[in-house]
Amino acid sequence: LEGQGEKISAGLPIIPQLVLNTQGYCRGNFFPFLQAVIHYHVAQNFAIEKLRGPLQWGPGIEGALFDGEGYSTAAVWRPTNEKPQQVLVDTGGVPFTVTDMYGRVQRMQPQNGRAMITIGPDPLIFRFERRVPRFQAVANQEPVLSLTPDPLILPPGMGGQVQVQLRNHFGQALDGKLRLAVDAEWKIEPAERAVKLVGGGVREWTFRVTAPAQVAHGKYPLFLELETSAGACVRAQGTIQVSAPVEIQLSERPFTADKPAAVVARVLNHTEQPLGGRLAVQGDFGTAERPPELAEAVEVAAAGEQVVEFALPEWTPNFNRDYVTRALLKLDEGQEVAAQRPLSFRAVVKRKAPITIDGKLDDWDLEQLSYGEFFRITERGGASWGGYDYTYDADTWAKVKPTFVRFYTQWDEEYLYWAFIIQDDQFKGGGKGVGVSAYDSIHFTLYPARTEPNVPLGGIAYKEHIGIDQDGQLTFDRWQGYMGDWRGDGLAHGVKLAIVPNEEGAIFEFSVPIRDYAPLEPKPGSQFALSMLYMDSDEGPDGKRTGWSSDQAMGLFWYYALTNVDMNPSRFGNFTLTE
């Protein structure tokens, strides 16, 4: 964006300066940062400030502090669509106003120098009434505040209880009023609770929240405020999910060599009466011997839930596709409740011992693992698209180019491991730094959470280019990411990489620290989404390789698209970490 500020917006000439001044902070974090800078509050608050520096609040929170003439401003957000986080901040006692992306403004008066705020994926803009000596998160072993349940699930016109727990980490006694609010049409009982809490103490309060009868289904913010005689020192936010009285949530148990895949159906009863009925699931995951649908009787208590697993034995799912699964609950009273969701049965199996990254693959136990195969083609520099969905059409592909990619993945507490077996009759790297991407290389895109079709991602994906450069140097170019070093040349920090060319093509083997894919956690049940391309750039008639522009160039895809994949969740395939 250097020199392009006026073209973007006459009111935001500061954008190129911010991009240049923040360097490593902004590089690789541009999309969520842009989400903040395009908002009108940025033009209002940051037009003349100088950047003091990025906020160091730990993984999962991004932000920056700026200084003006006699005051300070800041922007803070979570870079992915994760659950909002309650943070106790130390401002040195300086009061401030906090404004969200929807124009809601709250003045905060720190208590003993501290205030509590909720940080989510939508940026918050802070304006301090004078130069703030510091703006930092206070480390606590226990959460300052919790809302239970979060989200609170309510059908239209019905109510439920919210329990608020507060731990006093403000360093002195609290004396004030605790209030909840949604908007004017919602009913909150009682309207407020008196708070008297000694330093270090903990207490719980209960509120009843009732949704309007005509409210639309969807998510609504639930605001909590603690106000003392000096002003508000707590600004917290939870979520209310307005849904149908009875709900079905579908998920999957991934396929492994030890356990068959299964469809997991969770029946939620949001009413105050028990219910019973017959739950059935259907999908393209059966065998000739299996009935066209699987069914089971259910009995769900009032305001309760029941989880039903439909195992799929003697069936191996295809790594290269999702399975649209439908569920139908026929209640005893005659009503029907339906749900549909694409399920991904891909497992990333945990290692019992670390893998040696040497390109040999003899310690992978490949026969025990499922694998994926790149299944779409674009050819001639992207000018032609072949949509060979979910099948490997060997005859057709061979006429285009004899290229083939199979991949495997595993994990342990420290690393994600990857192995790619590549068939390429003219395998050869090239370029330098990010330039390796135009030659025989892997374009690797990982989003550290599950994706859903037609649901925009809550943040950017990690993007890397992996190959051998023109000097024979191994390159793992972290082109975009939240964590770790940005390196245009050689290997990103902590990455281990081996690329071994052979007669058929090459073996790519690498490991990446899981912490580099924050907020992905190294535990069973964690999920991520993947989108990849193998760039095959062969020599033209003149003996030269010219990358994407060559008629000899071809991209071989696994859930990839030649667009901004950050806003195309359907171009990602989901994976689940398992034991």
Image (cartoon, grey):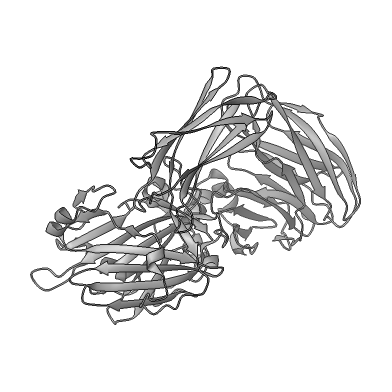
Q: Is residue 442 above or below residue 280?
A: below
Say whether residue 559 is left or right of residue 168.
left
Residue at 38% x, 76% y is 362
Does residue 138 appear in the picture of this structure? yes
Q: Residue 208 or 178: which is nearer the viewer?
A: 208
- Horizontal side, residue 456 vs residue 225: left or right: left
Q: Nearer the viewer, residue 480 or 421?
A: 421
**Residue at position x 50%, y 43% from top?**
251
- Which quadrant of the figure contains the N terminus? bottom left
Please say whether residue 486 is visible from this viewpoint: no
Say which residue appears at 33% left-offset and 50% top-offset: 563
Q: Where residue 219 sits in the image (x, y, percent)?
A: 59, 34
Residue in front for this viewpoint, 3 or 319: 319
Residue shown at 49%/67% (left/top)? 23
Q: Quadrant of the C terminus?
A: bottom right
Q: Position of residue 490 (x, y in %)?
A: 39, 78
Q: Is residue 334 above or below residue 542?
A: above
Q: Residue 462: percent from the left, percent from the top?
A: 45, 60
Most distant residue in the left direction: 541
Q: Is residue 325 left or right of residue 505?
A: right
Residue 285 in the figure: left or right of residue 553? right
Which residue in the rendered view is the most extreme toward the top?
Answer: 334
Of residues 247 and 289, the one drawn nearer to the viewer in this rendering: 289
Q: Position of residue 267 (x, y in %)?
A: 58, 34
Q: How many marks?
A: 0
